[in-house]
Image (tube, grey):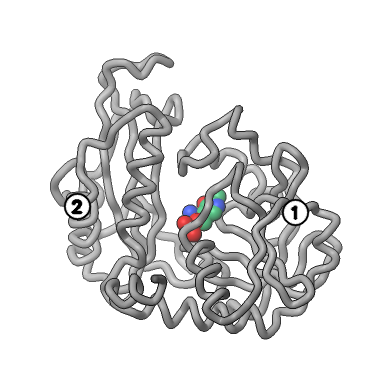
């Protein structure tokens, strides 16, 4: 596969209010966002021309900015419209959408005072994150790095600074031949992977860690609603890594990952099964629906 660098592609990027040719969407090297990680972003997927749960992503983007002490100078309606415009301008009906907001280059010190807030939105074709067969099951390494406490970092924000931990964990996992890493939190409890939330089937019920130090994913909440509609018992609670061995099925949920089965976490083995498959199919069916139907289905 030939890698096409992200700065050298055809297409359009929404850049502070207008669509610009892809290669022209550049920022200055002395940008606050680059030096001090004052940036927040979203990862969204479009299916059949609609961005799945777009307003939820846009609301989280705005909320993430507020966690970092800034207001994105565009309304949710304007950001939604811009996201749809980027998708259309790039001739995509299915793909990934990436809005990012960052502090600019007006001043450059730890203090953000005086910086303006920039917003860009890109979209590209992006098939399955972990490969086409999401039931096959991926291998997860056990991460060395831990998710920080909400007293250490704004853990509810999707901010770039927190992805340092993910990048380090993913790099190590890939060096070990795994697709991703399962991270624990500062207390040593099960948290999430570098880009998705995690679910365990234990005694036929669905267990997932309480999101008190990591992203309460939009896919996570969608899957929990689907599970309840399927009369499954869903238990959100603190989870100890010692419980992993007792799971019969494990899967991930995230916008990029969608629902993806896990077959290995460190020394533990799992066989992707009926519950994972039911929720995967349910999620796929829901993402194929127009937004009004998605909203109706999720109540
Ligand atoms: N955790 C992390 C670290 C993520 O990057 C993501 C993807 N945004 C998720 C969880 C899942 O969130 P969502 O379902 O909203 O995409």
Relative to 187, 109 lies left or right = left
Relative to 224, 106 lies left or right = left
Relative to 223, 77 lies left or right = left
Picture residue at 28% right of the left edge, 50% below the top: 121
Measured Cα–Cα span from mark 1 to mark 2: 38 Å
Q: Where is residue 153 in the image (x, y as percent from the top left)?
A: 56, 31
Q: Position of residue 298 (x, y in %)?
A: 41, 71
Mark 1 surroundings: few (<14), some (14-19) or many (≥20) residues within 10 A = some
Q: In which quarter of the image is residue 88?
A: bottom left
Picture residue at 38% right of the left edge, 65% below the top: 45
Secondary structure found at label 1 = loop
Secondary structure found at label 2 = helix
Relative to 280, 240 lies left or right = right
Disc 1: residue Cβ within 8 A of ligand 1's nearest atom: no
Picture residue at 28% right of the left edge, 33% below the top: 71
Which numbered disc covers residue 77?
2
Residue highlighted by disc 1: 239
């Amino acid at each position: 596969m030939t890698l096409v660098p992200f700065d050298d592609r055809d297409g359009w990027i929404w850049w502070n209010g207008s669509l610009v040719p892809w290669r022209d969407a550049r920022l200055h090297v002395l940008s606050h966002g680059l030096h001090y990680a004052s940036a927040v972003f979203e990862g969204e997927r479009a299916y059949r021309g609609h961005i799945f749960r777009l307003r939820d992503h846009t609301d989280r983007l705005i909320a993430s900015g507020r966690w970092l002490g800034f207001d994105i100078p565009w309304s949710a309606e304007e950001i939604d419209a811009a996201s749809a415009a980027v998708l259309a301008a790039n001739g995509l009906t299915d793909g990934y959408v990436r809005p990012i907001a960052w502090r600019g280059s007006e001043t450059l010190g730890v203090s953000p005072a005086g910086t303006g807030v920039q917003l860009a939105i890109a979209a590209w074709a992006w098939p399955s994150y972990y490969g086409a067969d999401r039931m096959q099951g991926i291998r997860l390494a056990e991460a060395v790095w831990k998710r920080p406490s909400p007293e250490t970092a704004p853990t509810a924000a999707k901010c770039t600074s927190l992805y340092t931990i993910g990048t380090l964990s993913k790099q190590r996992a890939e060096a070990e031949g795994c697709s991703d890493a399962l991270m624990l939190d500062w207390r040593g409890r099960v948290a999430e992977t570098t880009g998705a939330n995690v679910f365990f089937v234990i005694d036929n019920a669905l267990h997932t860690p309480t999101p008190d130090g990591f992203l309460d994913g939009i896919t996570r909440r969608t899957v929990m609603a689907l599970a309840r509609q399927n009369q499954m018992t869903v238990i959100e609670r603190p989870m100890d890594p010692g419980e992993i061995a007792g799971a019969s099925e494990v899967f991930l949920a995230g916008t990029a990952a969608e629902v993806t089965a896990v077959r290995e976490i460190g020394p533990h083995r799992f066989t992707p099964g009926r519950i994972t498959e039911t929720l995967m199919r349910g999620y796929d069916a829901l993402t194929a629906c127009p937004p009004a139907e998605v909203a109706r289905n999720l109540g």
